Image: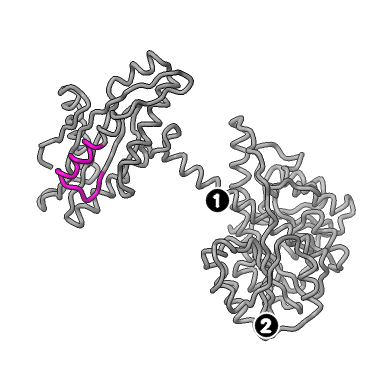
Amino acid sequence: MPGKILIVDDIPTNRILLRVRLMAAFYDVLQAATGAEAMEVITQQAPDLVLLSAGLRDCDSLELCRRITGFCESPDQSGARAAPSFLPDTAPAPPPVLLLSAQADHGLRLSALAAGAEDLLAFPRDDLLLQGRLRSLMRVGDSLQESHLRSGTSRALGFAEAPQEFVTPPRICILTDPTLHNPAWRHSLQAAPQGAVSQHDSRSFLRDVTADNAPDLCLLVLDRSLSSPGLRLLSELRAHPETRHAAVIVILPEPDNHMAADALDLGAGDVVAGLFDPAELDLRIASQIRRKRMADQLRSTLRDGMRAAVTDPLTGLYNRRYALPHLMRMAEHATRNGRRFAVMLADLDHFKRINDLYGHAAGDAVLVEVAQRLRANLRAVDLIARIGGEEFLIALPDTNKTEARVAARRLCRMISQDPIDVPGQDLAVTMTVSIGVAMGHRPQPQLSDPLPLIIERLLDRADRALYGAKACGRNQVTISNTAA
């Protein structure tokens, strides 16, 4: 099933008609005849979207819409909405709501948008636009649910919400074809947006857009006579790296359900057709900006999570989870290109006495400084990771034995030549490091050992070389002479 939709209408005929149309599009359909019944269904079955009649007799449909969406008149700077009070903390994100009315007049549409509805549609005689809206909202539903889930997980773990950063006004681009002249909609577009607004020729915009001036929202004006180029531009906005995450509202000076449905299917977040006023556009822009910032926050959370998963939090170096797969890719590349590479295991000498004499804070400061010195004396292409308490893995691609020996000795010298200051204590400690080196060779053609086994053997040789350096008095470099 492509999604689960709840129909809320106290007229059985309307529910039956909508149910038939939605099931023909393979949606899973739920039904409710009253507001109270709708609340129960939402709590128990978590629909992906709600089709709500604007004329319920048992309750105020707009108030019900506010309760379902958790909409508040003054959302926080992140644009997030509070979870409705009737939903438990573990419930999914509030579902989007589409209001349906026999006559979608302008005043009711403004009230619906202000109540948190995605749009107000006339009860569909032709369901082309309705189906386009449903597909568009289902597309963004997964990211909204994921954002809500991550927020709930943070609360469950007892993490405080991160302080909200200052949110700059959105950058809004009005994209029009210079041959279009319609003072009515042009005046409305320029009067409505709240933010940094600029107007561009739609035919040259993508050529000029950069990361520094990339928009948060594009208002794309289409016309029937220019439908093909306009819809093509919409596709290009979704493909261009600087605009693919921007919100897009398509402006149609005249109603056209076919073009509106096509625009929604091609990635537009909203469509405004026919006459509109600045107040309506303001509400639609605010909704799209909220959704865009929520998606930005989710992507940022994913990036931060991936970074945290592969990074040692103390030193900022990569950890074992990242280092071993990267080392395998390095070995595979060396095998394919007939190059050699070096693997080093570096271990601080007598590190335990730092913790014992000066405390763990001093030990942490030593580890951070050693990590910085190691990183500063390696190439950008080299790998360095902290894989144990005071043990570091270093891998140097395209490196022969002589170059590896010189690099390892340089690292020993850079660690030992300057004492390391201990914060909070008027002293500095001198550290040394022992390094074991193993060379990665191009495997013999007859050997067919799997790559993980080759890496395991390589690390074992580097480890035995490290023990050899410790046995020779520490602050030494030992190179394994075992054949690959």
> x, y (%) of residue 411?
26, 36
Residue at (84%, 56%) from the top-left corner?
10
Of 253 and 470, nearer the camera is 470
The quarter holding residue 435 reads top left
Residue at (42%, 37%) from the top-left corner?
316
Of 475 and 156, nearer the camera is 475
In this rendering, position of residue 263 left or right of residue 211: right
In this rendering, position of residue 229 left or right of residue 382: right
Identify the secondary structure beneath mark 2. Answer: loop
> x, y (%) of residue 415?
30, 31
In this rendering, position of residue 478 left or right of residue 214: left
Q: Nearer the viewer, mark 1 or mark 2?
A: 2
Identify the secondary structure beneath mark 1. Answer: helix
> x, y (%) of residue 86?
76, 39
Residue 403 belongs to magenta span: yes
Q: Which residue is mark 2?
A: 178
> x, y (%) of residue 216?
64, 61
Residue type at mark 1 is Arg
For the residues bearing labels 1 and 2, Cβ distance under 8 angstroms = no
Query: Can residue 23 be seen by looking at this rendering?
Result: no
Could you tell which of marks 1 and 2 lies nearer the N-terminus? Answer: 2
Q: Residues within 10 Å of mark 2 (few under 14, many from 20)?
A: few
Q: Which residue is mark 1?
A: 299
Picture layout, residue 237 above or below residue 400: below
Residue 423 belongs to magenta span: no
**Magenta segment, which residues?**
396-410
Looking at the rendered image, the quarter that the N terminus falls into is bottom right
Residue 426, label in figure = none
